[in-house]
Amino acid sequence: MHNYTIKKILKEDGLSKVLLVENNEIEGVLVEKKELPFCNSQSLIKSIHEKLYPESLCPRLINEDTNIYEYLGDKVGIKVLEEHQLDMLGQAIKHLHSNQLEGLKVQLFQDKMKSYQDILGSNLRDPIIEEGFKIFEALYKKDQKAIFCHNDLNNENIFFNGKCKFIDWDYACYNQPIFDLAMISKSFNLNHKQQEVLLKSYGDSSLSFDDISEFSLFISYLEYIWLKVIQELDYELFELEERLMQIKNDLN
């Protein structure tokens, strides 16, 4: 028998349900989700939190037995970022990327792409999927430096409550740092000036607007690939067909 009370559902999409719960008179968040073969295990996610919570980069784990995490509030899904938030975000990502999480068995991004490839099978002949993997091979053909990245920094996984904190580490792995920055740019539809603020606050002069543009395009293809993988696995995801059609229209 669990020792928490469910107060309300914060979010539900078919693959996961995010619950606001009360545990020993403390509000927390419990995520119930389907186990996907390419996602990080709950034990790895717990270890990531243990490493990054002291760095103020993620919420605190408040109940290890039930994986209940600190509740950061309802202010999620911000659509527009102010300049000071972009500055804070760039610095937080730089801080995240400086943590290499020694001792944890974290995959390379290429390993996750291989998992998608294996699952898709005959669907690899889909023209959009074919093009997505071509772009992937072009962007990852060199021996680039891979560092620990979040890999899913959309607007629903970023909180501003005094400090910038990140949630949902299912896809965290070693990747090129530009991936996280491009994901933010795409998710928040950043203009050139906002990208400049983000890059400046991140503080790596080797990264450019062109890099953001290239990886933002790849991320659009990647989202389509991911949705087709979910479809191939026969999992229910709300509005899956609508999202596939929207991406297809955007890419054409």
Image: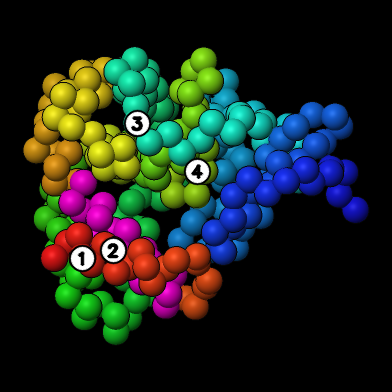
Please state which amino acid type lies under the numbered disc 1: Asn
Q: Nearer the observer, disc 2 or disc 4?
A: 2
Q: How is the image coloured?
A: rainbow
Q: Amino acid at mark 4?
A: Trp
- When the figure is inspected, residue 242 is found, relative to residue 49, above or below; the finding is below
Tag 1–tag 2 contact (CB < 8 Å) = yes
Of labels 4 and 3, earlier in sequence is 3
Give the vertical position of 28 relative to 82 (above or below). below
Distance from the alpha carbon under mark 4 to that under mark 3:
23 Å
The region drawn magenta spans 216-232
Secondary structure found at label 1: helix
Q: Which residue is mark 2?
A: 246
Q: Secondary structure at mark 3?
A: loop
Residue beneath label 3, please?
Answer: 80
| Magenta stretch secondary structure, dominant | helix
Label 1 and label 2: CA atoms lie apart by 5 Å
Q: CA distance from mark 3 to mark 2?
A: 21 Å
| Total marks in image | 4
From the top left corner, tell me how far across and down residue 232 is, in percent: 42, 77
Q: Position of residue 187 (x, y in %)?
A: 32, 42
Specify the farthest residue to the left. Answer: 210
> Which residue is label 1 attached to?
249
Nearest to N terminus: mark 3 or mark 1: 3
